[in-house]
Amino acid sequence: MLSYWNDYPTIQSKLQIVCSLIEKQLQVRNKEIQETLVDFANSGGKYLRPAYFFLFAELGETNQQDEEQLIQVAASIEILHMATLIHDDIIDDSPLRRGNITIQSKYGKDIAVYAGDLLFTQFFDLLIQSMNGSHYLEINAASMKRLLLGELDQMHSRFNKQETVEDYFRSIDGKTAELFWLACAQGAHFGQSTEKIEALAGQIGRNIGIAFQIYDDILDYTADQHVLQKPILEDLAQGVYTLPLILANKEHPEVFAPYLAKEKDLSLEEAQKVAELVISYDGVQKAREFAQNYTERALQDITQLPEGSAKEEITQLTKQLLQRTF
Amino acid sequence: MLSYWNDYPTIQSKLQIVCSLIEKQLQVRNKEIQETLVDFANSGGKYLRPAYFFLFAELGETNQQDEEQLIQVAASIEILHMATLIHDDIIDDSPLRRGNITIQSKYGKDIAVYAGDLLFTQFFDLLIQSMNGSHYLEINAASMKRLLLGELDQMHSRFNKQETVEDYFRSIDGKTAELFWLACAQGAHFGQSTEKIEALAGQIGRNIGIAFQIYDDILDYTADQHVLQKPILEDLAQGVYTLPLILANKEHPEVFAPYLAKEKDLSLEEAQKVAELVISYDGVQKAREFAQNYTERALQDITQLPEGSAKEEITQLTKQLLQRTF
């Protein structure tokens, strides 16, 4: 999926090197695990987080940068992301990821548990290779913990009909926004930008991450209903209530109560009915307004970045990613 | 289970502080996970690895030691051990651990996956707090990886009737001996011993770990058959062929072939019959000789440690642990 970066040739070539490094990190004596992970690494992830990392790194003093370090840090971010995806798919019993069958449904949960664990060790390994002694080691450990706590929040609030907008934002702040925050802040830091730019980069990353997750959650309600091979409405079926539903349910709980009461027994037809209700009671529209608001904040902050091609590419990518039409 | 250390009051009081630190590390906003992990931490582990860590630390220059650092490193070792146990129990579908119901069978695999992941983050966190900038960070990352590869070896060779003594030793070297090696080597290092003592400590730890695992595997064949509430013969039922069986099967494959061919369909009665055959064809006796050999090597190396009460306690503990009678 590096073809996504055809318009960003510098980023594309760096991401290619990151891909190779990740593949090298996945060489282990257990060939079953190795092939599983290499397959997964090549299964269509866009490497969005490493891409933002490099774009923010380019804002800094490029002649003072350590190229090898930047590649290693970029790879560590993607590996951490991959590890959490693999373990999440176990929790969700998810059959599909990126249009491909998930590791847990293809190879079983045993392989999936250890495959994720192995990625955590490789994440750790890359961090130590690239930043031993840096305070960013602590920051990475804290981010990894927040990521996990975000996932735990989501698991804990399954089938919670009282889930609030605040609960939702707390969960996505951990499970998604944290890693965008880390990618952008680390990019500025290891790219030798000032602390002021580093703080701004982190703030931009967090807002991009939040908007990104909201749009992703909206897609669960608006994606083409005729293409039901994809697990759309999957979150709903699993009791993960996201922003569009939370917003519609907040205003019209009586409409949704009979459906939500069914919990795991909600049929596909009923789930589709809920999706229609979420749309007709403006849940999607209001969620989109939230996403637009976060996107606006990110774009506003981006205008304050130092001028140059990196700033232009950050602007272009963020618009491409977040100014979606549905 | 800190009562195990009644004869080692100094170690006991240090382990008590480690317990408190671990409990503190397990405070997270998700109360379900927190209680699960606190229960598990208090469920009867002997804290053997941190104990060896402290004993080897005492050999060094005690007036140059950083007490807080030692406590953190000791806790990191036990937390890494706990994390691997929890994920192993998912793989094994194991109902019991330390005489208690396992996390995965009590709370489900979802909680167990994240509980283990959370411990990996806390392991990482403690390491960074205690040794950021030290080359022992790399050593810990490498150990974590070897631990996992040992588990993968074991998973990969399930129901492998051709499993060799070499395969067995490679697997236990990773899954068990590595962490004993780490505990003892780190004890000497952070206890401010010389590099020579550090290398010797690691070697002692590795041999103790190997002997410890062999005795543990022997127990699966010799534990009281009338107490079948305990999952004895569990490894056999799951296709994990350990040293006693490997040794007996090597000499008399024709005796074991009909049983091993049944793989997952082996009944409890058949498993008991296999255990009897392993004993009557000297598998247990020969495995015990291996264990005695590694124990002897460890005790021999221990005689070369600097004189003092730490050396005496290391000798006493190792004999108590490994000179078992069956």
Image (cartoon, coloured by chain):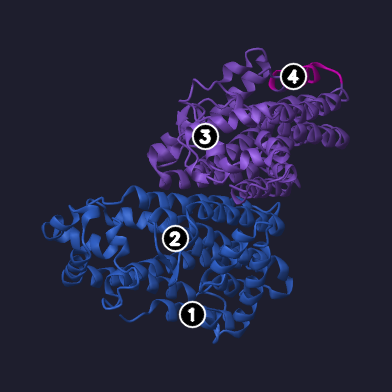
Chain colours: A blue, B purple
**Residue range corresponding to the magenta coloring:** B307-321
**Residue identified by numbered label 3:** B270
- Residue A103 seen: yes
Horizontal arrangement in the rendering, residue A45 relative to residue B151 (left or right):
left
Instruction: Identify the residue under disc 4.
Output: B319
Q: Chain of mark 1?
A: A
Q: CA distance from mark 1 to mark 4?
A: 65 Å
Q: Chain of mark 2?
A: A
Q: Position of residue A262 (x, y in %)?
A: 18, 53
Label 2, label 1: how far apart the Cα atoms are? 33 Å
Q: Are marks 3 and 4 in contact (CB under 8 Å)?
A: no
- Do labels 3 and 1 touch, CB within 8 Å? no
Can you identify the residue that label 1 sits on? Answer: A317
Q: Tell me the SS state at disc 3.
A: helix
Q: Earlier in the sequence, mark 3 or mark 4?
A: 3
Report, in whole angstroms, how far the alpha carbon at label 4 lies from the one at label 2: 47 Å
Q: Nearer the viewer, residue A145 or B120?
A: B120
Question: Is B266 or A205 nearer to us in this picture?
Answer: B266
* Residue B52 x %, y %: 71, 27
Mark toward the viewer: 3 or 4? 3
Q: Residues within 10 Å of mark 2 (few under 14, many from 20)?
A: some
Q: Residues within 10 Å of mark 1 (few under 14, many from 20)?
A: some
Q: Which mark is residue A105?
A: 2
Residue type at numbered disc 3: Glu
B51, A54: nearer the viewer: B51
Q: CA distance from mark 3 to mark 2?
A: 32 Å
Give the quadrant of residue A280: bottom left
Q: In terms of sequence position, does the residue under pointer 2 or pointer 1 come before the other? A: 2
Q: Is residue A126 above or below residue A326?
A: above
Circle 1: element type: helix
CB-based contact (under 8 Å), mark 1 and mark 4: no
Q: Quadrant of the C terminus of chain A?
A: bottom left
